[in-house]
Image: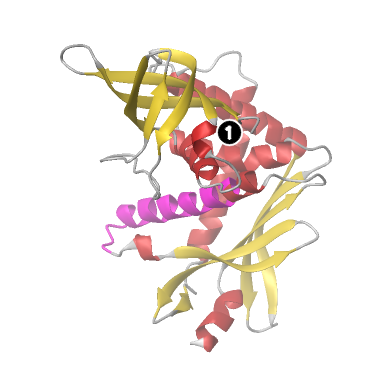
Amino acid sequence: MEAMESTLDRAPRMRIHFNVHEPVELVEMTLAFQGLGFEYQAFLKRRLLKQESKENTSNVKLYVTRIETNCILAELAPALPMLGSLMPVLSDVNTVHDFVQNMAKSIRWLKELANRDSVSAKDVTRSKRHLQHVRDMVQLVGKGRGSELGLATIRYEASSGQDRVLLEATFTDEECRQAAQGATRALAALEHREKADFEKVLMYFYQTNIEDPKALGKTGDKAVITHISPEPLNVYIIPETDRSRVRHVLDDKTHNPLHTGFVVDVNVEKSPKGKPRIYRVVRLHEIVYDDD
């Protein structure tokens, strides 16, 4: 089993390099890596569907094989957990290469989108989830000056005992800012049809579930928006990125999460008699911490 794990550094890998020179908020870095993992799963699933394969892609995950402390640089390899250990997917070099190439193309497309005079929903060819994940990656670099985002595909070559870089793409902080702006414009175009019933209202949680709420199904979370109703109602947070940010706050043990306010746009589901029943949060604008 140890031999399996030791060969992870010989599997096809992708390298992601956040070459930043200022402190980075932990939750932002977590969202960037989390988005990369989700995107790889989605890319792998689409590829196998095109090939009409019946393999289960949900078992293949990205694992960190190397991380440097003088910058945010990580190498990630696809692997299968087996018998309490990890089995690298050694034949996955083409998938890793194409995935990195696809991510680089998305960033370039978003840069171009940022410079258009106008953006409508018909101009957006990526999903909301993809746009949110890419934006989480690029805005980590775009916030700084003199920073860079690097993406690469690496293959280990047994003949030389060395790694070989098959594909490499680098984006400056200005390019990342443009890509983040393009993603924001694309998301705004897609969400234009999802106009909220109430915009920028203050919401407080009345009770929270200890587990992550699901996008669908029952939720143990209830919230109060006094501008709409004094009664606590079940709440669903639709955007995945906003859901992660809210969950990070609710799980923080250093303060009382029920005293933390969230400035949100919401849609309100009502009963046949017109009484508010469910809040659907479509946008999180700001988190307001209590002074205590």
Residue 167, percent from left and from top: 64, 57
Point out the stretch of residues depicted in magenta: 31-54
Residue 189 placement (x, y as % from top left) = 47, 20
Residue at image coords 49%, 35%: 258
Give the percent coordinates (x, y) of residue 198: 42, 13
Q: Is residue 255 above or below residue 182?
A: below
Q: With 152 as the anchor, is 273 left or right in this view?
A: left
Q: Main secondary structure of the magenta part?
A: helix
The amino acid beneath tag 1 is Trp
Way the structure is coloured: secondary structure
Determine the residue positioned at 27% across, 57% down: 52
Q: Looking at the image, can residue 106 be seen?
A: no
Q: Quadrant of the C terminus?
A: top right
Residue ID at (68%, 29%): 178
Image position, residue 264 (x, y; %): 49, 22
From the image, tell me which residue sits under label 1. Answer: 109
Look at the numbered disc 1 and give the secondary structure of its residue: helix
